[in-house]
Amino acid sequence: MPDTLYSRNGCHLCEDAQAALDAAGWPYTRVEITGDADLERRYGWDVPVLVRDGHVLLKGVIGASRLRRLTPPTP
């Protein structure tokens, strides 16, 4: 199951996180939090936030070096 990347449009850290995940071939689903009151309350200014099975793996700056410390999700 892929991880979930919570992000918002216009967020440069979110764009950088997506680029790092794509470059690593990391399975993920992007979820836009803008307009969803619950997600905005939960993640707000912490985006980007990478979540697996309800647990936050990374937030803020998500780059290649931080991803290398994690095990990719199983398909």
Image (cartoon, rainbow, N blue to C red):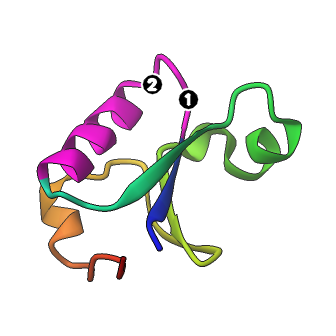
Q: CA distance from mark 2 to mark 1?
A: 6 Å
Q: Which mark is residue 27?
A: none
Q: Is the residue marked by circle 2 packed among few (<14), some (14-19), or many (20+) residues within 10 Å?
A: few
Q: Nearer the viewer, residue 17 or 59?
A: 17
* Residue where numbered disc 1 is placed: 8
Q: Position of residue 40 (x, y in %)?
A: 76, 39
Residue at point 68%, 40% (across, down):
44
Residue 62 in the image: above or below residue 26? above
Q: Residue at x 31, y 41 (%)?
A: 18
Q: In terms of depth relative to the viewer, which is nearer, 36 or 69?
A: 36
**Residue 11: assigned label:** 2
Left or right: where 62 falls relative to 2: left
Q: Residue at x 27, y 35 (%)?
A: 16
Which range is magenta?
Answer: 7-23
Q: Main secondary structure of the magenta part?
A: helix
Most extreme residue toward the right is 37
* Percent position of residue 65, x then y: 13, 63
Residue 14 magenta-highlighted: yes
Tag 2 and tag 1, C-beta contact below 8 Å = yes
Place residue 45 in its image quadrant. Answer: top right
